[in-house]
Each structure stands twice: as C-alpha cells, then as structure tokens.
Image (spheres, rainbow, N blue to C red):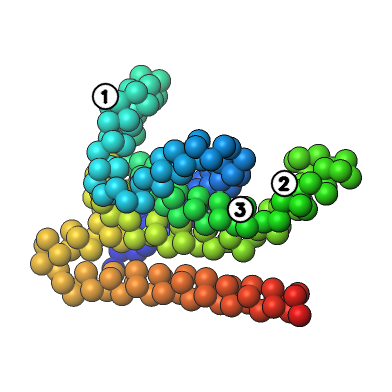
Amino acid sequence: MDWFPLYNSIRIALISAAATFVLGIFLAWWVTGLPRAAKGILDCLFTLPLVLPPTVIGFFLLKFIGVYGPMGRLVYSIWGEKMTMTWYASVFAVVIVTFPLMYRTVRSSFEAFDKNIIYAGRTLGLSNGYIFFRITLPCCKEGLIAGTILSFARGLGEYGATSMVSGYTPGRTATISTTVYQLWREGSDALAYKWVFVNIAISFAVLMALNIFEKRSGKRRAERWS
C-alpha cells in the first residue's frame, strides 16, 4: 500500500492550516475594527467560499494560477514552471476553502473579548502591538486553536477544488480523497475502503482532540469564575 496520499494530504492540510491561522487572525482583527457596513460586506466576501461549491472555487483558481492566468503566467515566465497539476496548487485551494472556518471562529472570539481590557492597557501606555500579542491573543487562544483544528480537519478531506487544480498523479499530487475516487473508478473497492477508514480515523481523532480541548477550556473558565 502506497502511503504517499496520506503524507501528501497531511502536508497540504498542515501548510494550509498554518496559512489560514495567520490570515484568519489578521483579517478577523482588522474586520472587527471596521464600521458596521464595511464589516457586513467583508464578512460576506470572506465567508463566501464556505457556501460556494468547491468546483467553483477550483474554476476561479484555475483562471488565476493557470498558465494563462495572471499569477500562473508570471510564474511560468520567470521560472518556466506551471503552478497547476502540482501538490502545492492544492495548498492554494485548501487555504481558500478552509479560510472561512478560521476567520469566523477567530472573529467571534475577538468580538467576545472585553474591549475594556484594551482601553485599560492603552491608558497604561502599552502599545497596540503589545496589547494584541501579549493580551488579546492569549485571551482568545481557545478560538484560535479551535479554528486551526477545524481548518486542518476540513483541509484533510478536501476534494473538489484540489482535484481541479492538482488532478491525480500517483507519487506527486495524489491525496486521500483523490485516491479514493481513482480507486473507485478502477473498481478497487477493497483498497478504497482502506483509505476511507484511514481518513475517518484521522478526522475522528482530530475532532476528539477538539472536544477534549473545549471541555478542558470550559472547565478552566468555570474554575476561574467560581
């Protein structure tokens, strides 16, 4: 049994989760400070990939990183390499698909954070950077961790957008999801079931970790306020 699809899926999910972690925190913090009208528009824009079909996301991504797209044409003219049909093309797709999960979770944490603490820090002469990194983020860490775990779990099973930009090439772009589909097409149901169970096991373990984390966080909050 070739384990490359597992390695590639985890690699893509981890890199994508790291990217959405940074983007989600930055954009969620930026949006919370905007006027209500602008916040509503940007909320719809940033959450749109959550409701769009993955194939639509893959289509637009192909138009952007494909050899005739703006980014794809630039990369090809400089390095002579195509961005599509590569494993890292899936990273772009997974980041777009999973970003709304991270963004919505982190934004909710920021909005629930007591702003009086920020105002108190400013009156004490603390810089905005110090308040953000040393006060706000540690206090909102539960939302940050939950959003990261959900993004990783979602990215691990992404199929629609990744299959359009990366396809299926054994040993190069194959993921668990694309491998299951390819094995089904070939009639190799027994091997397909093995990959299905692998995916289910990993997803179950990730979600169990999230539940345990939330349970412990809830217990700590109860002890803090008791």
Which of discs 3 and 1 lies nearer the camera? The answer is: 3
In the drawing, does residue 153 fall left or right of residue 105? left
Residue placed under numbered mark 1 in the picture: 68
**Residue 45 appears in the rendering:** yes
**Residue 22 appears in the rendering:** no
Q: Which is more toward the observer, 37 or 17?
A: 37
Q: CA distance from mark 3 to mark 1?
A: 41 Å
Mark number displayed over residue 111: 3
User: Label 2's element?
Assistant: helix
Q: How many marks?
A: 3
Residue placed under numbered mark 2 in the picture: 132
- Residue 178 image offset from top left, x and y in percent: 25, 56
Inspect the image, locate mark 3, and give the three-letter code of the amino acid beneath it. Glu
User: Label 3's element?
Assistant: helix
In the drawing, does residue 104 fall left or right of residue 51? right
Q: CA distance from mark 2 to mark 3?
A: 14 Å
Inspect the image, locate mark 1, and give the three-letter code of the amino acid beneath it. Tyr
Give the crowd class for mark 2: few <14, some 14-19, many >=20 residues within 10 Å: some
| Residue reaching furthest to the front | 36
Which of discs 2 and 3 lies nearer the camera? The answer is: 3
Marks 2,1: beta carbons within 8 A: no
In the drawing, does residue 149 fall left or right of residue 130? left
Q: CA distance from mark 2 to mark 1?
A: 41 Å
User: Label 1's element?
Assistant: loop
Q: Quadrant of residue 72?
A: top left
Q: Please report the residue visible at 62 percent of the width from the left and 52 percent of the height from the top.
A: 110
| Residue reaching furthest to the top | 77
- Residue 156 image offset from top left, x and y in percent: 38, 60
